[in-house]
């Protein structure tokens, strides 16, 4: 399995929870400083951060998998064709995990999914989007293919690459200068004006461009 699940670090948990709820996401985990929200496709975790700290307001690229050992084996097996073995089993503060390191030096974690998708009451048109900004878009895209992400053809013939995860969410590769970094976004396949009105009714500042 593969599910998109970035982590957003914030000192404003209450405001973020209200925003995600108004977007149409469902809170599925509420464990003090750690909260998880399911969209119709994909999951987003919130992690409490100290106000003004370096991590406050940042997002960590990340995914969930079924079995980290099997995921690492398959990812490295696929990577051998291009001469890379990006997956490494390791231990983080929260337990055993798999670290993926791209050729641009960007790294992120693939964690074992603690529970299945609980999105029956979430807005089915909303998807969580993890973004990989990188100076080497081709290599980043290949890493995601090796992980089992499904390429989604787009009309633009440029350095961008779009992928979907089997168990929910979207992964985007976008060219960027400097160090590789993560970004966070959402996709909506329904009526955007309805989302705008819903967010505005909740007191959020929102506009359409």
Image (tube, helix red, strand yellow):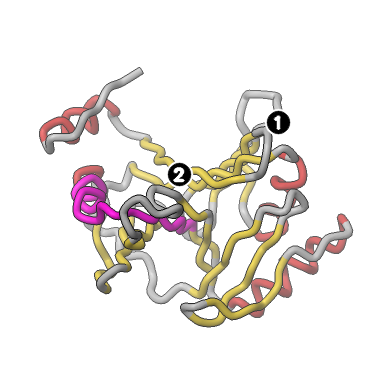
In the picture provided, is 181 more to the left or to the right than 16? right
Residue in view at x 46 percent, y 78 percent = 94
Q: Nearer the viewer, mark 2 or mark 1?
A: 2
Label 1 crowding class (10 Å Cα cut-off): few <14, some 14-19, many 20+? few
Judge whether 32 appears above or below 4 on screen.
Answer: below
Q: Residue furthest front?
A: 52
Q: Are marks 2 and 1 in contact (CB under 8 Å)?
A: no
Q: Position of residue 198 (x, y in %)?
A: 16, 34
Q: Position of residue 96 (x, y in %)?
A: 56, 81
Q: Position of residue 174 (x, y in %)?
A: 62, 35
Residue in view at x 52 percent, y 71 percent = 111
Q: Nearer the viewer, residue 166 or 137?
A: 137
Judge whether 197 appears above or below 11 on screen.
Answer: above
Does the magenta-highlighted stretch encompass residue 6?
yes
Span highlighted in magenta in the image: 4-21
* Disc assigned to residue 139: none
Residue in view at x 39 percent, y 48 percent = 57
Q: Which residue is mark 2?
A: 184
Q: Residue furthest top?
A: 209
Q: Which residue is mark 1?
A: 159
Q: Quadrant of the C terminus?
A: top left
Label 2 sits on a secondary structure element that is strand
Say which quarter of the image contains residue 200: top left
Judge whether 134 appears above or below 159 on screen.
Answer: below
Residue in view at x 25 percent, y 43 percent = 23
Sequence-first disc among 2 and 1: 1
In the picture provided, is 44 more to the left or to the right than 153? left
């Amino acid at each position: 399995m593969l599910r998109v699940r970035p982590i957003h670090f914030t000192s404003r948990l209450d405001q973020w929870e209200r925003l995600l709820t108004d977007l149409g996401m469902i809170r599925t985990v509420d464990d003090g400083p750690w909260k998880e929200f399911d969209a119709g496709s994909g999951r987003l975790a919130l992690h409490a951060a100290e106000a003004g700290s370096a991590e406050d307001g940042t997002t960590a690229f990340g995914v969930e998998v079924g079995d980290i050992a099997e995921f690492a084996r398959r990812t490295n097996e696929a990577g051998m064709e291009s001469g890379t073995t990006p997956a490494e089993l390791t231990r983080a503060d929260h337990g055993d995990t798999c670290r993926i390191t791209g050729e641009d030096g960007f790294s992120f974690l693939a964690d074992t999914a603690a529970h299945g998708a609980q999105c029956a009451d979430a807005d089915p048109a909303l998807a969580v989007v993890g973004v990989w900004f990188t100076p080497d878009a081709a290599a980043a895209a290949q890493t995601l293919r090796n992980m089992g992400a499904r390429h989604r053809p787009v009309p633009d013939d440029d350095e961008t690459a779009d992928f979907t995860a089997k168990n929910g969410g979207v992964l985007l590769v976008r060219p960027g200068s400097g160090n590789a970094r993560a970004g966070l976004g959402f996709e909506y396949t329904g009526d955007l004006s309805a989302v705008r009105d819903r967010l505005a009714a909740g007191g959020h500042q929102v506009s359409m461009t």
